[in-house]
């Protein structure tokens, strides 16, 4: 069944689509909270969300968005989360950081090496990989960063935990080879009943800034019994075998996720080392659409609930 977005692209001219998107964004800003979340959930999943007794994976993610625990802000903050990672699994898994600041100037950029990654700590997707700084317009780069700082990311999908994060820009070492970032391993950890082992599935993302593909595996690297709708898989033969670092990545992910009913831990493998990219509380803003659809409920059952996360 085609998505609502795909159907609109087929019947509406380009200008009408742009107007439609602007209207949707305006609605997202003005709708009362109960209507906003139900409308957004219905658009994504074709049904209404139960906030009183959430059962599905998507419902529990929407509950987190609407009623976040204070520690979620710490984990989503790309600066403060480094302390949690260091205390839990060690600093050796952190991507080296060059600088953190609340305002970016040309002089700021001049102090950095020729290659780095620039990203906002209070959002998702505001990231820029710079491989040759000497070829960049530094004034434009600084303007981009400062515009990021002005945006309230928490208002876009009303992922409320972002609203408590003080906006900053963090500059990190660029993990790139031939100008391209490494594959992205997203380890989803579900902690259910006390004493039972966690349930894990792994998303392997390739071509993050080009032709993005996504393959899903279980903990033993067998193919997951479900897929994400509208996500193209890769045919790369290298994915037939797990990376040799997989056992260590799984151990790290389980330790970081232990206090929570669910947590996604994002990894990169670069130059023979494991790096943690970020920890994700509300993946896809609750928009993971699974096939077969019953896996939304199956994963929800494996998502420990009600949550009792530790204090921030």
Image: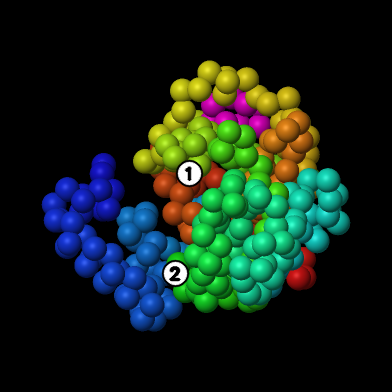
Question: Which quadrant would residue 187 be assigned to in this image?
Answer: top right
- Nearest the eye: 111 or 17: 111
Closer to us: mark 2 or mark 1? 1
- Nearest the eye: 199 or 74: 74
Where residue 233 appears, x then y in whole percent?
A: 44, 31
Query: Sequence order check: which comes first, mark 2 or mark 1?
Result: 2
Question: Which quadrant would residue 128 be assigned to in this image?
Answer: bottom right
Magenta residues: mostly which secondary structure? loop
Answer few, some or many: residues within 10 Å of disc 1's Cα (few below 14, many 20 plus, some between 14 and 19). few
Q: Residue at x 49, y 54 (%)?
A: 284
Residue linked to disc 2: 156
Q: Report the disc number at residue 209.
A: 1
Q: Residue at x 33, y 59 (%)?
A: 43
Measured in 3D between alpha carbons, the distance from the residue under mark 2 to the one under mark 1, in whole angstroms, is 22 Å
- Magenta residue span: 217-224
- Secondary structure of the residue carrying numbered label 2: loop
157 in the magenta segment: no
Position of the N terminus, as image quadrant, is: top left
Where residue 191 appears, x then y in whole percent?
A: 69, 48
Q: Is residue 87 left or right of residue 96?
A: right
Q: Residue at x 70, y 36 (%)?
A: 270
Q: Is residue 55 left or right of residue 15?
A: right
Image position of 129 with respect to 161: above or below? above
Answer few, some or many: residues within 10 Å of disc 2's Cα (few below 14, many 20 plus, some between 14 and 19). some
Instruction: Residue at the far front: name it.
Output: 134
- Nearest the eye: 119 or 38: 119
Image position of 63 with respect to 57: above or below? below
């Amino acid at each position: 069944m085609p998505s609502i977005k795909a159907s609109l692209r087929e019947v509406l001219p380009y200008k009408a689509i742009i107007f439609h998107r602007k209207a949707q964004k305006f609605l997202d800003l003005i709708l009362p909270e109960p209507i906003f979340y139900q409308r957004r959930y219905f658009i994504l999943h074709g049904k209404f969300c139960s906030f009183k007794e959430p059962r599905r994976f998507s419902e529990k993610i929407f509950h987190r968005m609407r009623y976040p625990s204070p520690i979620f802000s710490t984990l989503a903050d790309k600066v403060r989360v480094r302390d949690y990672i260091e205390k839990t699994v060690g600093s050796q898994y952190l991507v080296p950081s060059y600088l953190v600041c609340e305002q970016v100037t040309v002089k700021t950029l001049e102090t950095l090496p020729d290659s780095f990654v620039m990203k906002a700590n209070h959002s998702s997707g505001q990231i820029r990989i710079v491989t040759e700084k000497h070829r960049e317009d530094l004034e434009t780069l600084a303007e981009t960063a400062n515009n990021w700082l002005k945006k309230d990311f928490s208002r876009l999908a009303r992922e409320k935990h972002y609203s408590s994060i003080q906006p900053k820009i963090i500059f990190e070492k660029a993990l790139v080879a031939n100008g391209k970032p490494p594959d992205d391993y997203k380890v989803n950890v579900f902690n259910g009943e006390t004493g039972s082992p966690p349930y894990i599935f792994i998303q392997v993302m390739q071509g993050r800034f080009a032709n993005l593909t996504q393959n899903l595996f279980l903990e033993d690297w067998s193919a997951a019994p479900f897929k994400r709708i509208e996500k193209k898989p890769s045919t790369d033969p290298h994915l037939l075998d797990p990376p040799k670092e997989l056992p260590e990545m799984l151990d790290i992910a389980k330790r970081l996720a232990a206090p929570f009913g669910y947590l996604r831990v994002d990894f990169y493998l670069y130059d023979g080392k494991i790096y943690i990219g970020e920890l994700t509380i509300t993946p896809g803003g609750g928009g993971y659409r699974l096939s077969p659809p019953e896996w939304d409920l199956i994963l929800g059952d494996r998502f420990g609930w009600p949550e009792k996360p530790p204090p921030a």
